[in-house]
Image (cartoon, grey):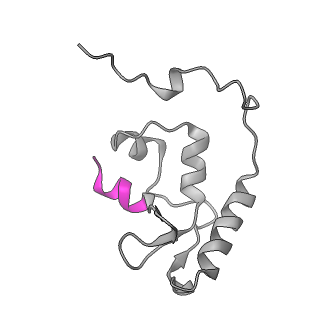
Amino acid sequence: MANATPDPQDLPPHPRLKSPTTYKRDTIIQALADLYETLPHIDPSGVHRAPEEGWPEITDQSVAACGLRKTAEAVDLLRHLPYITGPTNCWFAPDAYAVDYRAVVGRGR
């Protein structure tokens, strides 16, 4: 019988990472919005910024219901990221596609 995949939240932090990890959420959000809005193949009107309180459909519960194991900090970031509407599988770098977590939690598992 194969070993079960461990829950990432049960694993110790990677030794090369500072613990706890630190970043500025608003810096990440702004950088991603700037990237999306400057790509020539993405209509800037298709870039949607989160309301101040975040996307209401993205919660710890809705993310967990999809089988995604994210920390509260990760869910908070997903809740405030900008998302793109438009073509399915909209790429922003070679072999890198934007994921709209509003749609992911809307579909459920």
Q: Position of residue 68 (x, y in %)?
A: 40, 40
Q: How many marks?
A: 0
Q: Is residue 50 left or right of residue 101?
A: right
- Front one among 39 and 44: 39
Q: Residue furthest left?
A: 1
Q: Is the stretch drawn in magenta largely helix, strand or loop?
A: helix
Q: Is residue 29 above or below residue 62?
A: below
Q: Position of residue 9 (x, y in %)?
A: 52, 26
Residue in the image at 54% along x and 77% along y: 47
Residue in the image at 61% along x and 59% along y: 53
Q: Is residue 45 above or below residue 16?
A: below
- Front one among 70 and 94: 94
Q: Is residue 16 magenta?
A: no
Instruction: Determine which quarter of the picture holds residue 6.
Output: top left
Q: Position of residue 39 (x, y in %)?
A: 59, 80
Q: Is residue 5 left or right of residue 38?
A: left
Residue in the image at 47% along x and 70% along y: 91
Magenta stretch bounds: 102-109
Q: Residue furthest front?
A: 94
Q: Is residue 92 above or below residue 61?
A: below
Residue in the image at 43% along x and 72% along y: 90
> Is the N terminus in the top left, top right, bottom left or bottom right quadrant?
top left
- Front one among 96 and 49: 96
Q: Position of residue 84 (x, y in %)?
A: 48, 73
Instruction: Determine which quarter of the picture holds residue 26.
Output: bottom right
Q: Is residue 101 above or below residue 32?
A: above
